[in-house]
Amino acid sequence: MAGVARSAWWAEAWVRAMNRLAARRSAWAAPVAGFVSQPEPRTIGLYARGKQLVAGNFLFAGHLVEAPGIAIWEIAPPSSAFEAAVQGYAWLDDLAAVGDPAARQRAQDWTFGWIERYGRGTGPGWSPDLTGRRLIRWINHAILLTGGQEPARMLAYYRSLAHQTVFLARRWPAASPGLPRFEALTGLIYAGLALVGMEGHVDPSAAALAKECAREVDEQGGIPTRNPEELLEVFTLLTWAAQALGDAGRIVPAVHLAAIERIAPTLRALRHADGGLARFHGGGRGQEGRLDHALASAGVKPAPHVGLAMGFARLSGGRTTLVADVTEPPDDRAGASAHASTLAFELTSGRRPMIVNCGSGAPFGRDWHRASRATQSHSTLCIDGFSSSRFARDGREVLADRAHITLLRSSGVEGAGAEAAHLLLAGHDGWRRTHGLVHLRDLALSTDGRHLAGVEMLTAETRADRARLAAVLGRMPEGIGYSIRFHLHPDTDAEIDMGGAAISIALRSGEIWVFRHDGQADLALEPSVYLEKGRLMPRSARQIVLSAHLRDFQARIGWTLAKAQDTPLAIRDLDREDPASRL
C-alpha cells in the first residue's frame, strides 16, 4: 500500500522536474513580433471579486489573505491550491471586469512582476494546464496589459508569450487527461492563432484536441469524472477553441464539433430550475452566468434529453427540478474527487435550492475533503459508519469498493389527473459485501412539481445476502442503525411541526414545503454544513434525518415532501446573493 503511494509520488516529482527543465530550455525562444489577430475576450470575470483584488483582499481556494498595497507575488501562499489559482491567472478576468485605472494598474504591475520573477522558467506556474490557462488570459486581455507600456516592457511581454507557447508545445502531453489537458491544448491553439510566428502549432494542437474529445467525451456527452462543473469547464474551453478557429478561417475538426453537440444537452439536463448545476463528485453550482454564456456561444439548440445525463436522472414538474445520481462513482484516475453519492438527489423549487448535498470540501482542507465524500454528506440513505462506496486500502484517495446499480427504471408521466407523476426507481449494492443489503429508492414527482413521494427500502435479496445479514445481526442484537438524510440549503428556514410528525421548510421566495413520513422512523432536525467554493468557511445548515434500526431481512420507510404555500404573487424572486458578501 505504501509502495503504491510512493510510486505515485515519484511519478509526480518526475513530471515536475521535466516541466522545470522544459521551461528553462524554452526561455531561449525568440520573442514574437506581435499579434496576428486577437481573439475576442470570452472569459467572464466578476466585478465584486475584481474590486476585492484592487483593495488587497486575495481570496483563492478557500483562503483569504488581506494585504493592501502588496503585490500578489509577494504573498506567502497558504496552500498549494491557493498558489495554483494565483499562477493560473483566472483572476485577470475579475480585474478586467472592473476595468478602471486602478484595476488596470494592478493587472499590468502584477503581470510584469510575474515576468521578472518567473519569466526564466522558475516557480510553480510552469505546468501545462496552468500555462494554458494563463496564456488564454494574457491574450484575451492584451489591450488591458499593454496599454501605455514602454518598448522594453512590451519586448518582455512578447518574449514571455513566446516562451510559454514553446513550453506548452513541448509539454502539453504531460498534462493529466481530462480538464488539465483541455486547458493546455486550448491555450496552445489560442497562442498559435494570435501570435506572429506561432501558426505552426495550430493544426497539431487542434488535431490533438479532437483526439481528446473522442477519448474523454462519451456518447452521452459525459466525462469520466462525472463532475458537472468540470463538464461545464471542458465545454467552455471547447467552445472557445472552436470559435477562435472559426474566426481565423480554420476548419474545426468534426470530432470537436460533435463533442460540443453531445455535451450541450447533458449540461441542460444537469442544471436546476435556478440555472445552477447539480453539485456532485466535487463540482459546484458553477459561476453565475457561465453556463448560459457557454450554451449561447455553442449555438446548440435545446432538444428533449432522453435517458440519463452522465449517469444522472432528471425529474422536473412545474417549477421543481430533481437531479439524482444513479450510476456508480468514477474510479481510477477519474475518481480522485469521486463521492459516495449513489442514489442521492438535489431538489430546487423555482430559483431556490431546497434539498442539496453538502458539496465539495476540497477548498477547506484534507479532512473536509474526505468528510464531504462520505455518503452521510449526501441526501440519501446511509448505514451508520459505512459509506455506500469506500476508499481503496492501498493509500490512494479513490473509491475502490464502489456501489453498483442493481435496478434502474425511469419514466416520463404515468397516471392520470392528480395521480400523474414522473417516476424513478433505482437500487444499488453498496452494502452487499459488508451487510448483505441492497438499497432501493422509489421517487415520484407530480407533474405540477408540488409533491414528491419517496420510498426507501433495505433488503437482503439472495440466500447468500440473508446469510451475511444474519451474521451481522448476530453481532448486533440492537439492530443495524441507518438513516435517511435530506440536507437543506442554508437559505431555508426549517422547524419541526405538527407535534413532531412533520417539518415545515420555508424558502426565501415565500414558499412553504412540508416534509412528512409514515411513522416507521424517528424524525429529527440536525446540524449540517453547506460547502461552497469561494467562501472562507463552511456555511451552517440543517438536515432532516429519519433514523431507524433494521432487525429483519427488510426495512421500508415512506416519506413525502409537498408544497403547502406558493410564492406570493407580489414577490418577484429575482434577488441573488452579492459575491462580495462572501468575505
Image (cartoon, grey):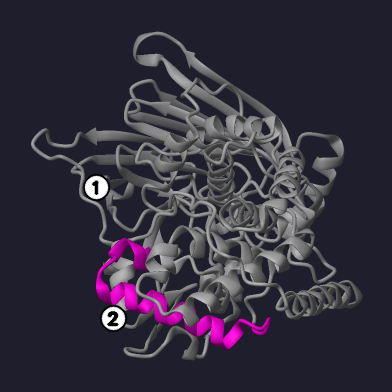
Question: Which quadrant of the rendered structure holds the C terminus?
Answer: bottom left
Q: Residue at coordinates 41% horizontally, 56% vertically from top-left?
A: 543
Check if residue 97 falls in the magenta segment: yes
Few, some or many C-alpha atoms within 10 Å of disc 1 (few <14, some 14-19, many ≥20)?
A: many
- For the residue marked with disc 1, what is the amino acid? Ala
Q: Earlier in the sequence, mark 1 or mark 2?
A: 2
Residue with the mark numbered 1? 506
Q: CA distance from mark 1 to mark 2?
A: 37 Å
**For this rendering, which residue is in front, 347 or 232?**
232
**For this rendering, which residue is in front, 472 or 561?**
561
Q: Is residue 377 left or right of residue 256?
A: left
The boundaries of the magenta stretch are: 94-123
Compared to 506, does 34 lie above or below?
below
Q: Residue 312: where, in percent of width, then height?
A: 59, 36
Q: Is residue 175 visible?
A: no
Residue with the mark numbered 2? 55
Q: Residue at coordinates 40% horizontally, 54% vertically from top-left?
A: 44
Badge 1 element: strand
Q: Which mark is residue 254?
A: none
* Occupied quadrant, residue 397: bottom right
- For the residue marked with disc 2, what is the amino acid? Ala
Q: Residue 330: where, in percent of width, then height?
A: 72, 49
Few, some or many C-alpha atoms within 10 Å of disc 2 (few <14, some 14-19, many ≥20)?
A: some
Q: Main secondary structure of the magenta part?
A: helix
